[in-house]
Amino acid sequence: MNGTSGLTIETRSLSKRFGHQLAVDSVDLAVPHGSVFGFLGPNGSGKTTTIRMMLGLAAASAGTVSVLGLEMPRRLHEVLPRVGALVEGPAFYPFLSGAANLHRLDAASRHAPPATRKARVGEALERVGLAHAAGKRVHAYSLGMKQRLGIANALLSPRELLVLDEPTNGLDPQGTREVRSLVRSLAADGATVFVSSHLLAEVEQICTHAAIMSAGRLVAQGPLAELRQSGEAQIRLITPDARRAFGVLLRLGMAPVAGTPEPDGEVVTAVAAGSSAGAGPGGDPAAQDMVAPEDIVARLVGAGVRVRGFSVERESLEDRFVALTGEGFDVAQ
């Protein structure tokens, strides 16, 4: 049974030091039961090291890890049979078939019942779309097929937690869609799915929660919708009356991003995070939180501003990532 905290994975002040280098620095991770949790960060940010400590593959220098309500690595032998993992790419015997590889891996587990092995291997291959290649030797598999075979291995027994490191690596668009659908179905069946990925578009499509790592530290985490909305919103206004519009917006508490109107008459103004029209210089915070976009437009029109275009835009998850880490991010394969 899972722990009572409502979390499948919980770390507290988790740290890992390699000599003088602090690779993971006091990470407090909270992964809710039943979530599809995206673990994001640039290369070298500490993601894989954190995962290895979570699974008992590396010893922590400080801090604690709880998985499925049990302390790791002390309760490792109770936890691992309930966890499926694909970490740092799959490794198989190249001259054995996909099915034969899975049979050998399943036989190596003392918790796997031999009587159901054939059926479970067949079901796992079917679930990842490799039933047609079950008898093909793995050296003839594409990178994407090997990736799917790794996921099949993680699914040989029912799992409460799936940890997938770059699960769509090397997959073509169809394979990516299949893995995306698979991850959703696993979550729908009640499993928690922890996905480490560098593909932001994939994370945005499949994850309910996410965390962002930068230089070994956890810089943000929470429900995906909250992470998207936690940045600064902006109003985008197109008008030939830019200077008059600035005056109206300043009285509403919104400071312009640009110091002067742009030549084409476009005005962009900053809006406080968490509100449709937040307080700025000269604004009343309590009052400005209640200003709705339609009310802003009404005030502009009432002041004689001709409005040709108006929208409220929030930062994307990619924008948040760049703002928090100072680095770019791959958004597509």
Image (cartoon, grey):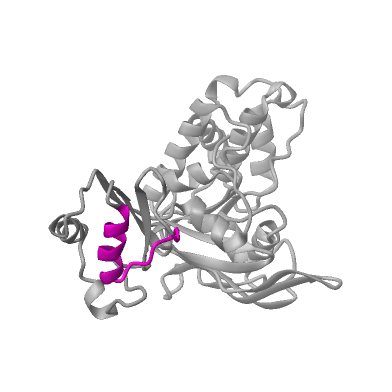
What are the residue bounds of the magenta stretch? 242-259
Pick the front one: 53 or 134: 53
Q: How many marks?
A: 0
Work out whether 286 lies above or below 169: below
**Residue 116 rendering spot, x and y as whole percentages:** 53, 39
Pick the front one: 145 or 282: 282
- Residue ID at (58%, 30%): 171
**Residue 290 rendering spot, x and y as whole percentages:** 20, 70
Q: Quadrant of the C terminus?
A: top right
Q: Quadrant of the N terminus?
A: bottom left
- Residue ID at (68%, 24%): 141
Work out whether 151 lies above or below 26: above
Q: Is residue 208 left or right of residue 13?
A: left
The answer, for residue 37, to whether it is visible in the render is yes
Assess whether residue 264 is covered by the magenta stretch: no
- Residue ID at (22%, 77%): 287
**Residue 179 rendering spot, x and y as whole percentages:** 49, 36
**Residue 114 rendering spot, x and y as whole percentages:** 59, 42
Q: Residue furthest right?
A: 19
Work out whether 271 lies above or below 312: below
Q: Is residue 246 left or right of residue 205?
A: left
Assess whether residue 243 is covered by the magenta stretch: yes
The answer, for residue 276, to whether it is visible in the render is no
- Residue ID at (29%, 78%): 285
